[in-house]
């Protein structure tokens, strides 16, 4: 049986000995630097309340769609893993962990294996690989660790060296947990809320009227009119910024943008409140509102991030039983150049406007996103994420984007995770891959090692700080 007493120090570094030596030096320059995580899904209350984690399954399996979706593909029911709000106690947690360990070979070759091995070995000191035989031993070691102060959320955040941690938040959230953290001098990590208005912009939703009302209640503004709706969104954006927010996050089926006449936008909005807006009208309204979000960004300074290209809730029976974000959002093709033509025509060169473009369709990296980032001072090429935040895809991204846009028009790494303990493993993966890419440029005499060293450090410090106005 393989053991994990010492993870290979050169994992993900080049096989060629000379290039690997350069990569080792570059990686060493970044390995211990603080983590900037400007987009993620770790709940702020975990840190604000500093509540101990309950069990290995709820911490490591149930929140991690990379893990549970692949287990589901192996025939493991999601209910057995505590997915989608399914309550799981000790009686269910241990069997779920056994199912994961029994299916460990299913993760061979995946980024999840790299992350989980790193978590088990480096966070918990686990010396065995998961298997049917080791499942209970590993479970007991993790469960025992979770009862100690060193494994409380705040202690782990400090241990991981996370300097910035962004959450993803509903526009009507009170942000009380963020205020608690900001007021606590013992919390060194900057925990920033992120304004996520997607569902408030989708006029075809059957609950759109209720959402508009809740927005109005949160802003104390009457949203029965389109003007009030816009004012409420502006108010909530200012509220998020006042509570440490630096960005807004948007995910729709596409990024087509247009501007409706004011009377037409008002008419569609009123129709949406009564459930009478057609699908075409609702789509036009959402595309119009993306431009309004950009307009608001030029006024309040929040960075705008877009990540289209996912067909949400692909398996209706799973959605009906477990809800959203349960592993069956599937990538689709997406187009940026024509879609963003209108928005960038209005705001692409506006001082202070910043737009970070992410995609699940890597065919657009070199064809569209890199050229856009290579011209517009407002546009940054977002890092590979979701299905693309894996070694081979990251390597392809670097090759596709760098030759056109360089390193300094990119976003820095985005871990985009609900799996809190995997944050350092994910960033470590990125730093190793960047060291490997830069080392190749050095050995090909395209960069000096001094230039590569400076770039490697910038990729985890100044580059994400600039892209997200940190």
Image: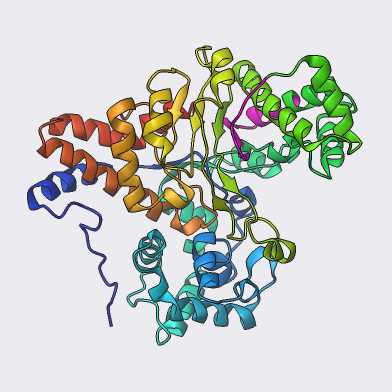
- Please give the name of the residue rendered at 17% of the width and 41% of the height, measured from the top-left corner: 439
Viewed as shown, does residue 397 lie left or right of 415?
Answer: left
- Please give the name of the residue rendered at 74% of the width and 27% of the height, measured from the top-left corner: 233
Question: How many dots with numbers?
Answer: 0
Viewed as shown, does residue 11 lie left or right of 383?
Answer: left
Q: Give the camera-side residue of 132 and 376.
A: 376
Q: Magenta segment: does it hold 254? A: yes
The image quadrant where one finds the N terminus is bottom left
Residue 50 at x, y percent in the picture: 60, 56
Q: Magenta segment: does it hold 9? A: no
Does residue 232 lie above or below 7 as drawn?
above
Extent of the magenta region = 235-258
Quarter location, residue 220: top right
- Please give the name of the residue rendered at 26% of the width and 32% of the height, measured from the top-left corner: 455
Residue 453 at x, y percent in the picture: 20, 35
Residue 223 appears in view:
no
Residue 198 at x, y percent in the picture: 68, 38
């Amino acid at each position: 049986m393989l053991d994990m007493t010492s993870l290979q120090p050169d994992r993900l570094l080049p096989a060629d000995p000379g290039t690997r030596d350069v990569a080792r030096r570059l990686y060493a320059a970044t390995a211990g630097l603080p983590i900037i995580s400007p987009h993620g899904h770790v709940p702020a209350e975990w840190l604000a309340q500093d509540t101990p984690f309950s069990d290995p399954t709820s911490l490591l399996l149930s929140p991690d769609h990379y893990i549970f979706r692949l287990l589901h593909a192996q025939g493991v029911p999601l209910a057995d893993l505590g997915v989608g709000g399914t309550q799981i106690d000790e009686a269910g947690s241990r069997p779920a962990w056994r199912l994961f360990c029994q299916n460990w070979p299913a993760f061979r070759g995946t980024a999840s294996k790299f992350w989980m091995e790193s978590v088990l070995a480096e966070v918990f000191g686990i010396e065995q690989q998961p298997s049917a035989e080791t499942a209970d031993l590993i479970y007991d070691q993790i469960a025992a660790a979770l009862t100690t102060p060193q494994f409380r959320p705040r202690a782990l955040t400090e241990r991981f060296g996370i300097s910035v941690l962004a959450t993803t938040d509903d526009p009507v959230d009170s942000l009380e947990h963020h205020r608690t953290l900001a007021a606590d001098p013992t919390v060194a990590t900057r925990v920033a809320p992120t304004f996520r208005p997607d569902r408030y912009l989708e006029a075809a939703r059957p609950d759109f009227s209720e959402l508009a009302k809740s927005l109005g209640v949160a802003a104390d503004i009457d949203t029965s009119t389109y003007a009030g709706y816009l004012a409420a969104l502006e108010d909530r954006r200012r509220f998020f910024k006042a509570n440490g927010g630096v960005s807004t996050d948007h995910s729709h089926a596409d990024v087509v943008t247009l501007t409706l006449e004011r009377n037409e936008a008002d008419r569609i909005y009123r129709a949406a409140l009564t459930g009478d807006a057609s699908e075409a009208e609702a789509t036009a309204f959402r595309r119009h509102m993306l431009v309004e979000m950009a307009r608001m960004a030029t006024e309040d300074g929040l960075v705008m991030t877009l990540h289209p290209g996912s067909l949400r809730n692909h398996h209706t029976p799973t959605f009906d039983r477990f809800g959203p974000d349960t592993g069956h959002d599937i990538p689709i093709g997406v187009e940026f150049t024509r879609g963003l033509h209108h928005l960038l025509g209005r705001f692409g060169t506006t001082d202070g406007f910043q737009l970070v473009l992410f995609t699940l369709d890597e065919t657009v990296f070199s064809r569209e996103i890199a050229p856009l980032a290579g011209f517009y001072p407002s546009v940054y090429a977002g890092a590979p994420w979701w299905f693309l935040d894996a070694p081979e895809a990251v390597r392809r991204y670097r090759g596709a984007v760098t030759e056109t846009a360089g390193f300094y028009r990119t976003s820095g790494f985005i871990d985009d995770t609900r799996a809190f303990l995997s944050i350092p493993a994910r960033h470590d993966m990125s730093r190793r891959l960047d060291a490997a890419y830069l080392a190749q440029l050095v050995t090909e005499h395209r960069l000096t090692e001094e230039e590569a060293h400076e770039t490697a450090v910038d990729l985890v410090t100044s580059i994400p700080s600039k892209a997200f106005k940190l």
